[in-house]
Image (spheres, rainbow, N blue to C red):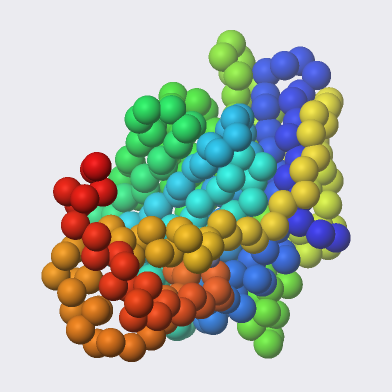
Amino acid sequence: MSDRIVRAITSDGMVQAAAISSRDLTERARQIHKTLPVATAALGRTLAGCAMMGNALKGQGASLTLQIKGTGPLGTILAVSDPAGNVRGYVANPQVDLPLRPDGKLDVGTAVGAEGGTMTVIKDLNMKEPYVGTVDLLGGEIAEDIASYFVESEQIPTACGLGVLIERDQSVRAAGGYLIQLMPGADEDTITRVEGGVLAAGNVSAILDKDPDPEHLLKTVLSDFDVKILESDPVEYKCYCSRERVLGALASLSADDLASLREEQKDIEVRCQFCDAVYNFTPEEIAALNTPKEEEKE
Ligand code: ZN
């Protein structure tokens, strides 16, 4: 089954939810960044959470950035979603390798390092100022951190589950998750039923391994509710880099950096930080970037 996000609401209107199946885009991220398993899991969870959050945005050109600045060996993890839920991302140190936890699971929490770390969400709705919210990391396992972001920063009671299952050959076997949010006016009984469903459903990657359909995942977690599916969108790993954009980024380097690039008098190669694209620029193109700012204004 190809990657997909579904959005749903319960028939009583008290709970809204999204779920994603993201095996293919997580595997694509692994191949681009050559991540080892614990980094694949951390980046895969971040991409899945970011995709569901981005898919909730409306408006062309809008984007949602999810940045996890932990204090563990992985370093910063960053993911960006377009308003459809297509995502791209990277992890600073993709080759981190850690022993498994005593329960046999990948130790994402230690690799991320919650102590002293933060999670930042940037919603750029293509208006003047993007909305930025930052919270302290709770445990570094990412799903609980996203839930705590919604509770603290947006005052929305939220349950989040994310999972990435890795094959013996280190490829991605299953990936995805869910995001469940209470609507204003939801009562104690609704909260209890959501919590009960989350507990009963258990491990997300195990559910997706048996059945990768995100609609079934949602109905499993919200088994105590009548669930109405509102939307179902295909999603993929998608980068928006281009030669022009990379050249634009080079032009914003400091005058000193540009001068030293020019002095080298040779082709320079720039790799996109999100995908496997490589762009080459000639010394002439680099020299042309050196237009003094005063002249540009004329
Ligand atoms: Zn790219």
Check the image and report above or below for 291 versus 271: above
Q: How many marks?
A: 0
Q: Nearer the viewer, residue 283 or 121?
A: 283
Answer with the quarter of the image where residue 191 lies.
top right
Quarter containing the N terminus = bottom right
Q: Nearer the viewer, residue 272 or 195?
A: 272
Tell me which residue sits at (68%, 87%) in the image.
169
Quarter containing the C terminus = top left
Answer with the quarter of the image where residue 82 lies.
top right
Q: Nearer the viewer, residue 278 or 48?
A: 278
Whether residue 152 is visible here, answered yes or no, is no
State the image coordinates of residue 62 (x, y, percent, origin top left): 53, 37
Q: Nearer the viewer, residue 33 or 147?
A: 33
Check the image and report above or below for 230 versus 146: above
Tell me which residue sits at (48%, 32%) in the image.
125
| Side of 19 where 136 appears, left or right | left
| Side of 200 where 150 appears, left or right | left
Check the image and report above or below for 101 versus 46: below
Whether residue 289 is visible here, answered yes or no, is yes
Residue located farthest toward the front when viewing the structure as drawn? 298
State the image coordinates of residue 3 (x, y, percent, origin top left): 76, 56
Tell me which residue sits at (30%, 65%) in the image.
289
Answer with the quarter of the image where residue 273 lies.
bottom left
Tell me which residue sits at (33%, 40%) in the image.
134
Check the image and report above or below for 285 versus 240: below
Residue located farthest toward the left when viewing the structure as drawn? 256
State the image coordinates of residue 70 (x, y, percent, origin top left): 33, 60
